[in-house]
């Protein structure tokens, strides 16, 4: 059997490149280590980070994971609020609902164990939104199902909403949601700060706070793979590193062709176009570099893919289409190296593209 897999669409969030439908496969448990939650979804959830202006010069980030089908989308995400804005999440949430909804169909209070929350069903232009929000310490979680108008809800929708669970939350204080003191935000990282992944066996540099996630992917014919990712944003640029170990059923007899296909070429024509491509290497390991412009979301992806044994690595930057190449994005790509924690000097830097 020849199976292939690619990570590129995980970064092209909401491009409409290739939709899935709930029910084509069994729901899989998605776990976010940094987000400290789990949820079950029949759609593959892909990470995206959006910068938020909370007002008064205060900024935060909305860390979301989105799965898209033809008639439905599943979203789970979270926002961390500073302790002096304890009244902001509810007020902002109400403004968001009123601003985007035509009619609030139903709303009620609910609990996530000992943590307070709220459920709402909202009519919007072109569809309906079923949403659950939970306040855990200073973190607001949102679990959302958005359906196209005229399409009936499915058991998978309810399972997605009800399967959400918080992990490692015992240190949070449910009696004072969104107002607990927390350490001052860490200083913004710089390109000089190296990120080492012991499990991933790589090192890379980027001026971001990394968000970790993992998800199960279905390659067909009963073959599944675990995808691991680290992502973060800085100055409007998304940086991401993803890796996975190819199952034995995946044919690697032609590694150069496999790397090129895994770099995203098989998704071209779904609102995406190839701007440039080039072969490269990571020491003795084959690699491929490409730039893909996604017209429907007006973003440009720079992608480097390497095959090291049976492990596939992918580095991606995403920035607005038409923007000049950012030097920091190129430096991020070229900083990637294999990492062996037992032999700190054993690393293989990426070779610059010709």
Image (spheres, rainbow, N blue to C red):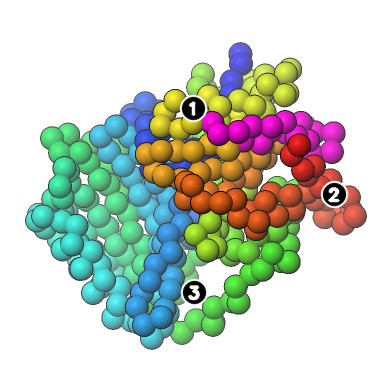
Q: Please name which of the two marks, 1 or 2, marks the residue nearer to the observer.
A: 1
Q: Tell me the residue that label 2 is attached to.
A: 347
Local secondary structure at mark 3: loop
Spatial distance from mark 2 to mark 3, Cα to Cα?
38 Å
Crowd around label 1: few <14 · some 14–19 · many ≥20 (10 Å): some
Instruction: Estimate the x, y position of residue 23 in percent, counting from the top left.
Output: 33, 29
Instruction: Estimate the x, y position of residue 329 in percent, counting from the top left.
Output: 63, 53
Nearest the eye: 261 or 26: 261
Spatial distance from mark 1 to mark 2, Cα to Cα?
33 Å
Q: Please name which of the two marks, 3 or 1, marks the residue nearer to the observer.
A: 1
Q: Quadrant of residue 53?
A: bottom left
> CB atoms at circles 1 and 2 under 8 Å apart?
no
Residue beneath the point at 23% across and 74% down: 91
In reply to whether residue 282 is colored magenta, the answer given is yes
Instruction: Estimate the x, y position of residue 110 in percent, counting from the top left.
Output: 23, 64
In the rendering, which numbered label is found on residue 171?
3
The residue stretch that appears in magenta: 274-290
Spatial distance from mark 3 to mark 1, Cα to Cα?
46 Å
Q: Tell me the residue that label 1 is attached to.
A: 268
């Amino acid at each position: 059997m020849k199976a292939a897999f690619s990570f590129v669409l995980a970064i092209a969030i909401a491009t409409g490149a290739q939709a899935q439908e709930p029910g084509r496969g069994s729901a899989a448990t998605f776990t976010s280590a940094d987000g400290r939650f789990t949820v079950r979804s029949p759609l593959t959830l892909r990470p995206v980070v959006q910068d938020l202006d909370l007002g008064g010069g205060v900024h935060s980030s909305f860390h979301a994971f989105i799965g898209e089908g033809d008639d439905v989308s599943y979203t789970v995400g979270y926002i961390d609020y500073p302790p002096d804005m304890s009244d902001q999440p509810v007020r902002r949430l109400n403004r968001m609902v009123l601003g985007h909804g035509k009619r609030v169909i139903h709303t009620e209070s609910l609990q996530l164990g000992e943590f307070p929350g709220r459920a709402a069903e909202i009519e919007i232009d072109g569809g309906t939104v079923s949403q659950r929000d939970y306040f855990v310490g200073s973190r607001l979680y949102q679990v959302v199902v958005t359906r196209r108008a005229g399409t009936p809800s499915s058991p998978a929708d309810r399972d997605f909403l009800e399967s959400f669970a918080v992990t490692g939350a015992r240190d949070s204080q449910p009696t004072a949601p969104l107002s607990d003191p927390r350490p001052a935000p860490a200083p913004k990282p710089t390109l000089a700060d190296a990120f080492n992944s012991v499990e991933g066996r790589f090192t890379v540099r980027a001026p971001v706070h990394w968000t970790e996630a993992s998800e199960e992917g279905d390659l067909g014919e009963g073959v599944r793979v675990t995808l691991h990712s680290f992502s973060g944003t800085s100055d409007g640029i998304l940086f991401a590193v993803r890796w996975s170990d190819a199952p034995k059923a995946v044919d690697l007899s032609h590694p150069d062709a496999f790397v090129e296909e895994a770099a995203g070429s098989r998704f071209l024509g779904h609102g995406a176009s190839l701007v440039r491509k080039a072969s490269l290497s990571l020491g003795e390991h084959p690699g491929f570099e490409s730039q893909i412009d996604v017209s429907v979301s007006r973003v440009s992806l720079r992608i480097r893919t390497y095959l090291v044994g049976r492990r596939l690595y992918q580095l991606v930057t995403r920035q607005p289409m038409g923007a000049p190449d950012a030097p920091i994005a190129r430096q991020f790509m070229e900083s990637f190296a294999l990492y062996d924690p037992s032999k700190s000097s054993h690393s293989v830097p990426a070779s610059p593209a010709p």
